[in-house]
Amino acid sequence: MAELTYREAVAAGIAQEMRRDPTLVMLGEDVAAAGGVFKTTVGLLEEFGPGRVRDTPISEQAILGAAMGASMTGVPVIAEIMFSDFLAVCWDMVANEIAKSRYMTDGQVNFPLVIRTANGGGVRFGAQHSQSVENWAMMIPGLKVVAPSTPIDVVGLMAAAIRDPDPVVFFEHKALLAVKGEVPDGEVVDRLGEARVVRQGTDATVVALALMVPRALEAAERLADEGISVEVIDLRSLVPLDTATVLDSVERTSRLFTVEENPRLCGWGAEVVSIIDEEAFWSLDGPSIRITTPHIPLPAAAALEDLAIPSADRIYETIAKAIDTRGGG
Amino acid sequence: MPTDPRLDYALREPRPPQPVDESLADAGIPTQVRLGMYRKLHELNGFGKRAHDLFLQNLVKGTTHLSLGMEAVATGFGAAMRPDDYTFATYRGHAHALARGMDLGEGLAELLGRGNGVVGGKGGSMHLTDVSKGMMGSYAIIGAHLCVANGAAWSAQMRGTDQVAVCFFGDGTTNIGAFHEALNFAVIWSLPVVFVCENNLYMEYTPIDVVTAVPRPAADRAPAYGLPSIQIDGNDPDAVYLTASDALATARAGGGPSLIEAVTYRSGGHSRADPGKYRPPAEVEAWKAREPIPMYHRRLLSIGTPEETLTGIAREVAEAIDAATDFAKAGPLPREDSLLTEVYADGGSRWRN
């Protein structure tokens, strides 16, 4: 057992898989000699050499094109897009080429590739380096979408994403990079499409992702002091989506809250709420409530950004108010 | 009627083809190779004409982009490539798929939206793919597939297979960012990839020179990436074959990428909806007289091929196209349950439990 930061876990997960599979390669801007601008790939060049860990030009389409072409001809690839905002520069590759080519060719090709990218806000970078764009990826048929919240999940889900024969967009949260956690020795391999109940409770289900998970947990602790027992689910993966875990929880707690960092419209929580509405409506004691970033570009100033992204305070207050109202006191 | 060529491109000066380089008759290309190319020219041409006929019968829906008149580029490369080399083509990809050996019937069936189509009716005219023949896909959004071809070339380089990726695209592609990203990337990694610009003088409905900073859209960009400028007669299968052979050999030997501009002309419009009225009539006529099949027929006669051999090949191909048409028309519609298959590698489309 070792204590790793989320940042170190990224490199640990990649290294574990590159040791296992000598054909696995990685490319991206500043990923090799510099060890990544977020230092998430430190040590990989030294261990695996310049043939397998390669620096690229600032050419996001070329990066993902290389990853696509190599993966469809038998070489599994990890490609880094430095900031998830930059996915917009190469969205044709992601949405039109990588995601659709398996279907368009009636299954003639597979794309064992992982697109890693630094996602999310809370680091005062402003509107073009802070977005949570997991919902962009979620809405494209053909992609799988993963967003871990802890170091152990970074390692295990990275391994699962790399071993998966489909393209996986792997969102690493910038505000979690310094978070520490225990990671067992030896091989760590998780499964895509399994949510985790990270706190058990009986009065409400809170579904969260990535940075919103620790915030939801903090809110749940404070709600417990008020006598409100909150179950917190870390969704971990948006595609495949573990609806069974959420349905099971809501059927027990009878209330659903989602906590989303993405801007409001078409956030992943809307899909979760709609599924619960269709399939567990009669279990609900009140309306499902989405706690999200407002539908705005993110501001840079700390005071403003902190108002925008759901905080533990906002989660606490929203749930306390809703639960309070339900019973009339 | 407008008289200003800026208002009507058909009033511009015609851009005629270059004269045939008759010396290529003595280029030392084996006769068997040439007869194979002659057959392929007929297949590509016959397939395109049949696709057009099937449109007129309202049997092909959607759109299609024919390569009539442009058959020599796909043919010359197809003859020069190794069976395990990779082809990446555009939405105008019928010729490139056929040049690698896609079945004529499976190709026509795909255009007809049948279940016996080469991609089961899921791709259609713009996405013909036959990986078993090294035809790695037809990509319908300009630019991306140059980057994808790099990836296949990188993979071949890492696996040490000496395979080469060949990527075909039009003149219009030279003005999108992915073209420039792909060229720079291929050069810095010395990838075994050959980029082939089929310059048919028009990006869709607009003359390419009106929208391009340099006269030769690909060849004049090559030096910016440290590559030689190569512009060839794209209507001469021998010229294409020789240039392709050189570029493939260079790539196989570790010499890195090439960029080849093959000048050609499409006999028809950009797509089904386009009669091509923006082109000067004299230009269309001049290029019609330079279509690959009659020129190559003359060349083969000039080197002593019997006329009967050539007419025999043309007849066999015509029969094969008829048989392929029957195969396509007799094909079943795609099974309804195929709608939800092959999104993910488990063969399905399931996104939740």
Image (cartoon, rainbow, N blue to C red):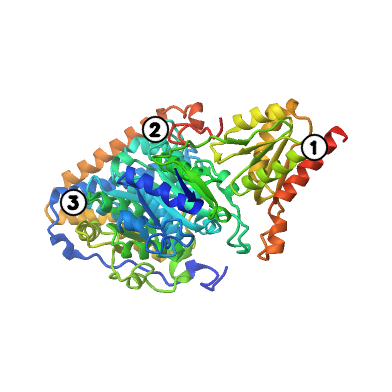
Residue position for label 2: B328
Q: In the image, residue A4 lies at what x, y percent?
A: 47, 50
User: Dot 1 falls on which chain?
Assistant: A
Question: Which element type, helix, strand or loop, lies under badge 2?
Answer: helix
Relative to A61, is B27 on the left or the right? left
Q: In the image, residue A211 lies at what x, y percent?
A: 61, 49
Residue shown at 33% from the left, 61% from the top: B186
Q: Quadrant of the N terminus of chain B?
A: bottom right
Which numbered disc flags the more N-terminal residue, 3 or 2? 3
Residue position for label 1: A323
User: Dot 3 falls on which chain?
Assistant: B
Q: Which mark is residue B277?
A: none
Relative to A302, is B15 on the left or the right? left
Residue at mark 3 to residue at mark 2: CA–CA distance: 29 Å
Q: Which mark is residue B34?
A: 3
User: Dot 2 falls on which chain?
Assistant: B
Q: Do marks 3 and 2 both belong to one polypeptide chain?
A: yes
* Image vertical order of residue B22 relative to residue A317, above or below: below
Can residue B272 be seen here? The reply is no
Q: Do marks 1 and 3 both belong to one polypeptide chain?
A: no
* Image vertical order of residue B116 relative to residue A21, above or below: above
Residue neighbourhood size for the residue with mark 2, other residues' Cα within 10 Å, grouped as few (<14), some (14–19), many (≥20): many
Can you tell which of label 1 and label 3 is closer to the viewer?
1
- Amino acid type of the residue that numbered disc 1 sits on in the rendered structure: Ile
Q: How many marks?
A: 3
Residue neighbourhood size for the residue with mark 3, other residues' Cα within 10 Å, grouped as few (<14), some (14–19), many (≥20): some
Q: Nearer the viewer, residue A301 or B84?
A: A301
Residue neighbourhood size for the residue with mark 1, other residues' Cα within 10 Å, grouped as few (<14), some (14–19), many (≥20): some
Residue at mark 1 to residue at mark 2: CA–CA distance: 63 Å
Residue at mark 1 to residue at mark 3: CA–CA distance: 81 Å
Q: Quadrant of the C terminus of chain B?
A: top right
Question: Which element type, helix, strand or loop, lies under badge 1?
Answer: helix
